[in-house]
Image (tube, grey):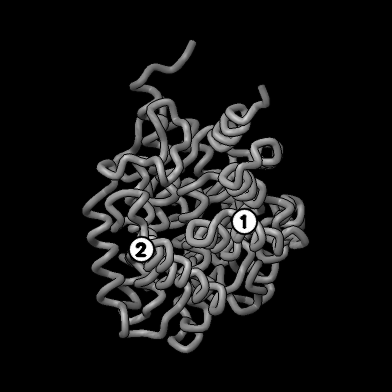
Amino acid sequence: MRAGPAELSTEVRIEDLLRELAPQVLGTLVRRRGQFDACEDAVQEALLAAATQWPAAGIPDRPRSWLLTVADRSLVDQWRAESSRRRRETGAALDRVSYWVPPDAIGADQDDDTLTLLFLCCHPALSPPSQLALTLRAVGGLTTAEIAAAFLVPEATMAKRISRAKQSIKDAGARFALPPQPERTERLGVVLHVLYLMFTEGYTSSSGPGLQRTELTAEAIRLTRLLHRLLPGEGEVTGLLSLMLLTDARQAARTSRDGSLVPLAEQRRDLWDVAAISEGLALLHDNLGTAPIGPYQVQAAIAALHDEAPTAEETDWPQILVLYEVLTRIAPSPLVTLSSAVALAMVHGPRAGLARLATLDADERMAHTHRLEAVRAHLLERAGEPAAARECYLRAARLTASVPEQRYLALRAARLRPE
């Protein structure tokens, strides 16, 4: 028997609520108890209990407190079991440890806990890739497969990286507190990258039946707003928030009624969120000239040019190409090269874009993503090579785990089927 609309609505609401509360509960539990790895396991147990019980019993009046209580009990039970196995004394000593709460934990702001958790996951004892992976897992709630897709590495590799990161946090004896200002600045770049990847995974999901995961984009925007409030003078924080708003503004136009992908050039611009665009533009303009230019500010400027164009045909592609050249100089990456190839093709023709794409053929990082073949297919189609374009579309469809992208790419290939 299928669930009706009301049941589905409740399930979706519970799923969204649990995603929002998970990092807050984990942050509070780690602040109270320490032992990051054990706390994350306990929070996962609490989330599972909520997902099982809330649909029937209803969402409690204080869902965050409910989750924290269940997670705390799970953690205590785990410690007691471990103590029993090791034949250590339990009882009063364990009770004093298990239920002690630091004075500063009482009345602490849950948003501060989430931000502190962000900075904890970006501890200097970890390598930058491990910092990113751990934060996406603990704060963003992404699966190991989703994180692996974002990093362009195999899932097994990412699983080992996350496991090592948790152990390193434990070995370093990290405290749950915001780092001092100099160290906070050093970790900021990683925190921003994490929020960017979280938003990207939500905006275009790497797997699953839906193109977008709006709960992830909303959480990334929420956390970036918090960070902007904490560090209002940081140009790249402002740039990232602007980029997110300007990009997310197109969310309603990116899929048709049946869930099919709608490319940017074909989107109905009257469906774009005018308020989000206005806020994003204001942040970008107020930030210009007040801080050193960074990659998020440049990407926000590119997004602004797309959003300000009345039609796809009126997009200022020459200026976008210039901005991609700047981005290539200050933050080179294969995905930047990929995007710049599209801009180059729009200005100088598809052959120029294809030549730039060819520079990525030997890059192993592109072997785990469909995007290179998808862009190549588009440019080959524009260049008048339908047979080659069709083969690239089909290869791209096989490489992606996103159902909407698979359908879109397969449809593009079918339209190029030889007579």
Give the answer, above or below, for where 392 lies relative to 42. Answer: above
Give the answer, above or below, for where 141 lies relative to 413. Answer: below
Of residue 313 and residue 116, the one placed in the foreground of this image is 313
Q: Quadrant of residue 105?
A: bottom left
In the rendered structure, find residue 351 and report the number of the disc placed on it: 1
Q: Residue furthest bottom?
A: 182
Whole-percent x and y of residue 84?
A: 71, 53
Q: Is residue 411 left or right of residue 82?
A: left
> Is the residue marked by circle 1 packed among few (<14), some (14-19), or many (20+) residues within 10 Å?
some
> Is the residue marked by circle 2 packed among few (<14), some (14-19), or many (20+) residues within 10 Å?
some
**Kind of residue indicated by mark 1:** Arg
> Marks 2 and 1: in contact by CB < 8 Å?
no
Residue under label 2: 111
**Kind of residue indicated by mark 2:** Asp
Q: Is residue 386 left or right of residue 69?
A: right
Q: Name the residue: 38% across, 71% down.
A: 239
Q: Name the residue: 24% across, 62% down.
A: 279
Q: Quadrant of residue 162?
A: bottom right
Whole-percent x and y of residue 18?
A: 43, 44
Whole-percent x and y of residue 151?
A: 64, 58
Q: Name the residue: 60% across, 60% down.
A: 352
Which mark is first along the chain, 2 or 1?
2
- Observer-side mark, 1 or 2, equals 1
Give the answer, above or below, for where 85 lies relative to 259. Answer: below
In the rendered structure, find residue 70 and report the number of the disc placed on it: none
Query: What separation in Å lies between label 1 and label 2 (alpha carbons)?
Result: 49 Å
Q: How many marks?
A: 2
What kind of element bears circle 1?
helix
